[in-house]
Image: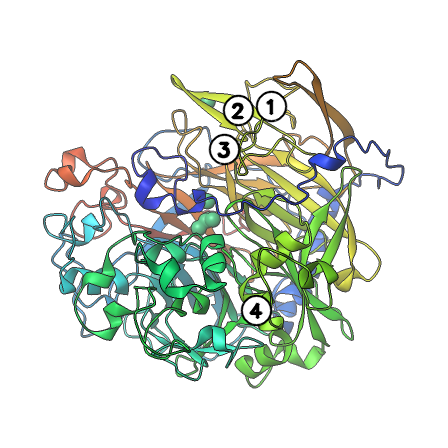
Amino acid sequence: MNKLNDLAISATDLNDIDSNASQDNHFNSILNARLSRRNWLRGSAVTAATAVMGSMGLSACGGGSDAAAVTPTPEKLLAFTAVPKSLADVVSVPAGYTATALYALGDSLRAATPAYKNDGSDTDFDNRAGDHHDGMEYYGLSAAGAPLASGAERGLLAMNHEATTDEKLSSHFLHVNGGTTSLPRPAAEVDKEVAVHGLSVVEVKKTGSAWATVNNSVFNRRVTPLTDIEIAGPVRGNALVVTKYSPTGTKTRGTINNCGTGKSPWGSYLSGEENWAGYFTRSATDNAARGDKSVASLNRYGRSQGGASRHGWETGGSDDKYARWNLSKIGASNNGSDDYRNELNGMGYIVEMDPYDKTRAISKRTALGRYAHESAAFSVPTVGQQLAVYMGDDSRNEYIYKFVTTAVWAAADANPADRMATGDKYLDSGKLYVAKLAADGTGQWIELAMSNALIQAYSAYKFADLADVLVNARLAADAVGATKMDRPEWCSVNPANGEIYYTLTNNSNRTVNPSGSSQLAPDSANPRAYTDMKGSSAQNGNPNGHIIRFKEGTGAAAATSFTWDVYLFGAESGADASKINLSNLTADQDFSSPDGLAFSPYTGICWIQTDDGAYTDVTNCMMLAAIPGKVGDGAKSTLNYATAAGGNLAVDTFIGKKPTADTLKRFLVGPVGSEITGISETPDGKTMFINIQHPGENTALANIGDPSKYTSQWPANTGYGAGKRPRSATIVITKNDGGRIGS
Ligand code: FEO
Ligand code: CA
Ligand code: CA
Ligand code: CA
């Protein structure tokens, strides 16, 4: 979603809910700890090494049987001509590449479900592609249709359907006349809107040089906010997740607002539940009705009493499937088994699905903590060692986390007989850590556990047990003084060296002169606070975002310390290079609000995607290809800010080696109003699938009857499908000479 979009801010800007009012160390207190860091690692010639290292990373990262699929090739990466910034309503890719829409909102997954008319009259969304395609992973099939990780011409795309384009409650493109914008919402509208959320799995197949989806494939699957899902890990059976739907606290209904993804080393699909809180309502008198610590939890997770739900789905009727969207304590029970007072505790997890088997139940992996999840990125698996899963919490001033498995990696688990059982083994037992970054370029991973004295003594919330710590991970992280970041979005591990990259998309609450509990001064890891003009409108804080990276210390995946630097700062190429454009981005490289980020396990390229509202007066959102160096390849720098009191605020930071034309280049620009997301490739590196999310999202509901006033008509304007309403869609990118993507 476009977080800086003024038109849609109240309805869709759920990331901007600022729920972190904790006063703990966000590093202002150590701003002046000017310890010089002498062990900066030297840069290396990664450009030359990456083509080789990329294929090495394949077997480590993508599952065992991928290894034979790729042989090192001598091609030069990033040899394409950079794509210029653009406001055109098309997908632009470099000369020599082709991008084609493949799978759009409403596309039929079943023979019995008719083609999408795209005029608001369609129904049966349980058997169609969902909306707002987001994170996505590719799972290979053999020519005969059996699971085969190395399968590069037939496979499955598993993806998230994060949200739906809306204005005043209604998802207007889904309804003939834009739908009902007041309460109560009609059941038929609610049912459609609910069903476009969740996950989908769709088979894709290459015939000749053309890719197409396979209608009615036995693998095709929809998961929605009504699908029965297991609660797995330490929270399973806990009193915090007892509901009318599951009085034993072992199940929850559905998954929602699924954003980033992960692909486990055992071949399962991981999905992060992000802005789930906003779909639920709470009565204006619910605090008094509860009168317990659950009020502090609800407030910390963005559901203060009286909060209206995004779509008003709780008003769809008397059926339980509508009632579940109301979190108010209305039942007489002591434990919540007769209402949905605890329903929010069943949302906010990393969800695991076997993409190859639609008969298997999906599990919420509660050991990884509950927050606004994005992606889940695994450390490079090493036999006999623990795995780490890196994650972020995307709201302003939230935290970076990692989970370390109890189990050590076994090579046989790269091709397990039972992927979900393997998920039980690695993801239901382990330790959850939160990151605390210091001004000297080091950092600590702090375990969130009852054994931590700061958690035991926390005055704002009394934790009962580990399950309570995991359900209220934000509060536990507050208690231990974790570092508040500029909205952590996706993360990914560089297969060449194991370093971890996090996009920090932007933060309108960074300011040199903070007031109130939600504003923060710039600090070493979030060092910029400035003004970027969008036309005549000033955007303050860190409107363009940055990308931070970590190198684990002793213990690798299980390390409790790390070093860090800032790989790239988003900026306009013309911005002040001493204060804003700190990475010296050129016109072929400049970007704003990095969001999706993933290393290709096949080429080693780091793909960076944007979800921007700051630079969109000049360009639509984009995807860039990068060949980064490593932590410490740049230099320490000090940013000086004049304070309102007349003093100087000096902020030390560590800026990665500045990119060259050979190491960072814009690869794609999307249609009007879209966000670029979802990074996945076939294991030969020759086909890339990405998602174009919410083209035309700024189209006013009042213009629903006049296609000429839609801000985008993509992908219909490329000849894809019926109607003219814009649709989120997966696109397939190939190189015309058959080469690998990014060469
Ligand atoms: Fe769904 Fe934080 O992006
Ligand atoms: Ca600007
Ligand atoms: Ca995102
Ligand atoms: Ca975003």
Secondary element at image label 3: loop
Q: Which residue is mark 4?
A: 468
Relative height, residue 237 to residue 283 (above, below): below
Along the polypeptide, which appears first: circle 3 or circle 4? Answer: 4
Please report whichever mark, 1 or 3, sits nearer to the chain's N-terminal start. Answer: 3
* Secondary structure at numbered mark 1: loop
For the residue pair 463 and 601, the one nearer the viewer reads as 463
Identified at 57% across, 29% down, the residue is 514
Location of mark 3 (residue):
508
Which residue shows up at 30% across the image and 56% down it?
131
Q: How many marks?
A: 4
In this rendering, the answer to whether 54 lies above or below 167 is below
Residue type for callout 1: Ile
Distance between mark 2 and mark 1 Cα atoms: 8 Å
Mark nearer the N terminus (4 vs 2): 4
How far, Cα to Cα, is label 1 from label 3? 15 Å
Select label 4 or label 2 by which is in front. Answer: 4
Q: Residues within 10 Å of mark 2 (few under 14, many from 20)?
A: many
700 sits to left or right of 671: left
Q: Which residue is mark 2?
A: 572
